[in-house]
């Protein structure tokens, strides 16, 4: 198959790409780094970028000025963005560029947690807005990507409900991979930067201490509380252990602090370990984060049992895999299945403090280097160069537009009109396969049923 290496892709990040950044920024930066070898990639970020990335065209956009993004999109062959971007920039519904919509974040379920303390009426309005946004995205996109096969099953239902799964799209591709495919979170095709940043350098971190790392954000749908509650028992056997929360505050100042972050901080104070053996850092620069991953001895990601967990992709757990960091995770998400399948650490029931304690003690009793060989297979499988392949292939090949982006539904064909069309198609089918008499007989029975 011949590829056109002059194709262009605009990746529109809904979050900042800077020295400090959260999961979305990391995702799109690493995507751009891999895809720029085959495509002319421009990474667009909110505001003015304060750094440049070798090999990548980095540009800023202003949500108040759609033209700051429209010129880039209209000059690109393909544009990749999330449903949030579609809401902020309505011109994307009509752009000439092919639209790839990224559904890796099941934000509808996150919002159920995020707005939990708002009045119920407001929660219902916000939920309906999120549902309408997903439906708009389902009708607008030319191609969709998501984070896992489990997510693909979820979004396939949404596409089905919006008319995107139909005889025409099935005829063009019975697998429907040309409509929606998995492009999850990957691992860089290199070793992480291994440089000591805490042990023997920070006054509270002795050279022989063992670091337990919470490598992501403190979001309301996570469970750092169980980890802090387990910590005194861990210290009784490992007094040199240090617990580090890396994302106590989102690196994007526009994102408000989540309530669980303050609860974690307060509990650390109550047990007398805040800034003694428990440390809450706002965020580390991206390069230093790699070093801390290598320096840590255990990686932790815990959550309660809820629907967001079932469909989530914990980006930071993939970071642990990249750094060959033995992991402690709660059951219920796909990351816990990977930890169990490849024997990369321990999986515990949600909110089970005794289980967290026992697993942490077992991990700290063992030698970190003994776990390292187990990560070879998963690191190869999740390399970014392999993960992005469906997106790369879509951008480099001119695929057919499946079902014409459901133009019929966008134009609002009435249910009555659809009913007559279905009846006419059914009549033609009976005539061809059973004959004219059979058609008359069925028509007469239908007439009798109607008048009765």
Image (spheres, helix red, strand yellow):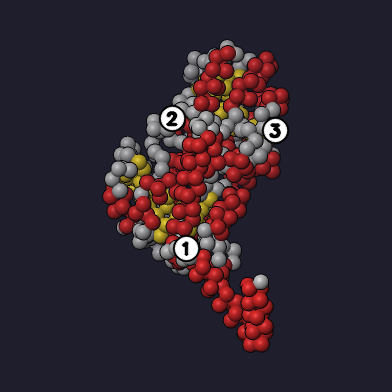
* Furthest residue in direction front, as rendered: 452
Q: What element carries label 3?
A: loop
Q: How far apart are marks 2 and 3 (CA)?
A: 29 Å
Q: Is residue 386 visible?
A: no
Q: Is residue 393 visible?
A: yes
Q: Position of residue 437 (x, y in %)?
A: 66, 87
Label located before the other in sequence (1 or 2): 2
Q: Name the residue under label 1.
A: 409
Q: How far apart are marks 1 and 3 (CA)?
A: 44 Å
Left or right: where 120 falls relative to 334: left
Nearest to the observer: residue 140 or residue 121: 121
Q: Is mark 2 on a helix, strand or loop?
A: loop
Nearest to the observer: residue 48 or residue 126: 126
Q: Is residue 101 above or below residue 271?
A: below
Label located before the other in sequence (1 or 3): 3
Q: Where is residue 243 in the image (x, y as percent from the top left)?
A: 57, 22
Q: Residues within 10 Å of mark 1 (few under 14, many from 20)?
A: few
Give the quarter of the figure containing the C terminus: bottom right
Q: Where is residue 135 in the image (x, y as percent from the top left)?
A: 49, 53
Residue at 59% in and 51% down:
154
Please tell me in which quadrant of the rendered image residue 331 appears: top right
Q: Mark 3 points at which residue?
A: 349
């Amino acid at each position: 198959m011949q590829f056109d290496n002059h194709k262009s892709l605009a990746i529109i990040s809904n979050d900042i790409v800077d020295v400090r950044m959260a999961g979305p920024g990391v995702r799109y930066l690493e995507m751009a780094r891999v895809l720029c070898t085959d495509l002319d990639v421009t990474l667009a970020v909110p505001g003015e970028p304060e750094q440049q990335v070798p090999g990548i065209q980095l540009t800023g956009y202003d949500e108040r000025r759609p033209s700051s993004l429209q010129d880039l999109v209209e000059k690109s062959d393909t544009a990749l963005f999330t449903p949030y971007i579609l809401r902020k920039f309505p011109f994307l519904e009509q752009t000439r560029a092919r639209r790839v919509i990224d559904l890796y974040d099941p934000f509808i379920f996150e919002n159920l947690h995020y707005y939990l303390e708002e009045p119920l009426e407001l929660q219902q309005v916000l939920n309906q807005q999120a549902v309408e946004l997903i439906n708009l995205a389902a009708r607008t996109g030319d191609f969709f990507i998501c984070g896992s096969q489990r997510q693909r099953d979820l979004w396939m239902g949404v596409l089905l409900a919006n008319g995107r799964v139909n005889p025409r799209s099935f005829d063009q591709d019975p697998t429907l991979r040309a409509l929606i495919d998995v492009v999850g979170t990957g691992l860089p095709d290199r070793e992480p930067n291994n440089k000591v940043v805490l042990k023997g350098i920070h006054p509270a971190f002795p050279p022989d201490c063992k670091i337990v790392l919470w490598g992501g954000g403190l979001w309301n749908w996570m469970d750092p509380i169980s980890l802090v509650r387990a910590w005194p028992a861990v210290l009784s056997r490992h007094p040199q252990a240090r617990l580090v929360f890396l994302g106590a505050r989102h690196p994007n100042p526009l994102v408000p602090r989540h309530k669980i972050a303050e609860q974690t901080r307060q509990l650390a104070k109550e047990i007398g370990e805040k800034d003694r053996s428990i440390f809450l850092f706002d965020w580390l620069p991206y390069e230093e984060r790699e070093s801390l991953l290598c320096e840590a001895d255990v990686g932790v990601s815990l959550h309660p049992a809820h629907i967001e967990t079932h469909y989530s992709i914990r980006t930071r757990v993939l970071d642990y895999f990249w750094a060959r960091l033995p992991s402690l995770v709660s059951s219920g998400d796909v990351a816990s299945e990977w930890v169990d399948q490849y024997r990369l650490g321990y999986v515990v029931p949600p909110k089970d403090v005794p289980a967290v304690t026992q697993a942490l003690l077992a991990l700290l009793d063992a030698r970190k280097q003994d776990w390292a060989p187990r990560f070879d297979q998963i690191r190869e499988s999740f390399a970014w160069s392999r993960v992005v392949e469906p997106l790369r292939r879509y951008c480099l090949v001119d695929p057919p537009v499946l079902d014409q982006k459901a133009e019929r539904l966008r134009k609002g064909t009435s249910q009555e009109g659809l009913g007559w069309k279905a009846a006419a198609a059914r009549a033609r089918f009976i005539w061809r396969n059973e004959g004219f008499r059979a058609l008359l007989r069925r028509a007469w029975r239908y007439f009798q049923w109607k008048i009765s």
